[in-house]
Image: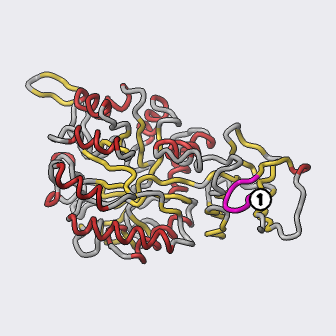
Amino acid sequence: MERLIIINGELILPTGIETNKIMVCRNGKIEQIVSSEAYIPQADDRIIDANQQYVSPGFIDIHVHGGGGHDFMDGTVEAFLGVAETHARYGTTAMVPTTLTSTNEELMTTFAVYQKAKSLNKKGAQFIGLHLEGPYFSPKQRGAQDPNHLKTPHPDEYNTILEASQDIVRWSIAPELAGAVELGEKLNSCHILPSIAHTDAIYEEVVKAYEAGYTHITHLYSAMSTITRRNAYRYAGVVEAAYLIDGMTVEIIADGIHLPKPLLQFVYKFKGADKTALCTDAMRGAGMPDGESILGSLTNGQKVIIEDGVAKLPDRSAFAGSVATADRLVRTMINIAGIPLIDAIRMITLTPARILHVDSQKGSLEEGKDADIVIFDNQINVTTTISKGHVIYNQ
């Protein structure tokens, strides 16, 4: 079996950045990381010269809706593959396709298409499970979610959804809704991550949800409560709970627009790289020029405007998802937030892998793990993306 050999790179390893190392990959796995002197060439080795660029674990995007003009809610295999191939160009090797609040019929179509697309996906980022975003959200914090489909969780409905797909790995929910705690317990028993999102919960409700298994917060600061007053009394919200609950993990849309520099720095300082994942939350406009676009499916989606590097509602009253790619998230954290490269990389590799419990296979460059690798220059411009030992993008 042909080996893939990466030479002359600055390897971003769990122990730090190493320069005099060679990576040997075979059968989709990292077989060895050895010193240059210890490498023994074989006749059929395929050599990739990193030319003194960084060699990093592949980026893992745990919240993404679309890209390249496609959205997962389009309900076609072509859309799924188009999104995966678009984001592969920017270093993403694994992603969690994310739905929007929609009809159950659209959801069922998405489940069926996911299976087909996964089997045909040879040139894009790997699909590592589905993320349901909605429909159990607070109307007050709906953001760009369709208000016509918002509802409270009912066992008859969510059990039908859970029975329809074995691919769901996370479900974002407003935990203060009636029945949401019970749903969280159900998801936990199914090894699905319940995540807090589009919520007006107060701190006490978040604590109760955390105890029921809601251990992650979706796009921190976006569409969620902070300090509120009720009958003159102040209450802490979801944002405060994110910091007070040590075990809670969070994700942030680090495009430099959804969160300004001080908030990016605040999250990094008080949650840290081990509890904070970077996500794109990208809609179909990622990798596309500015102009009019659609959030969600082409048939039932919402018109949006892409300008200033972000998607906005037509009246510009709120953001409607990002158009970020994973490389941009890393650049933002380094250039705007001023955090070290190695921590920015951890937040888009090992931390999301741990959140989804796939860190035994992904998230770091270690022997025995999947050969998911991205090579980029010192400006985080991606030149090569490798998925399970196969080159899926080369500049």
x, y percent for residue 52: 77, 55
x, y percent for residue 231: 8, 25
Q: Is residue 113 above or below residue 4?
A: below
* Residue at figure coordinates x 21%, y 41% from the top left: 180
* Residue at figure coordinates x 76%, y 63% from the top left: 4
Query: Residue 288: in sight, yes or no?
Result: no
* Residue at figure coordinates x 19%, y 38% from the top left: 176
Q: Nearer the viewer, residue 144 or 209?
A: 209
What type of secondary structure mainly makes up the magenta span? strand
Element type at mark 1: strand
The answer to if 44 sits in the magenta stretch is no
Quadrant of image for the C terminus: bottom right
Q: Could you classify mark 1 by the number of other residues whose Cα lies within 10 Å: few (under 14), some (14-19), or many (20 or more)?
A: many
Q: Which residue is labeled 1 in the image?
A: 6
Magenta residues (range)? 25-31
Q: Is residue 171 above or below residue 84?
A: above
Q: Relative to residue 369, is residue 202 drawn left or right? A: left
Q: Relative to residue 182, is residue 391 drawn left or right? A: right
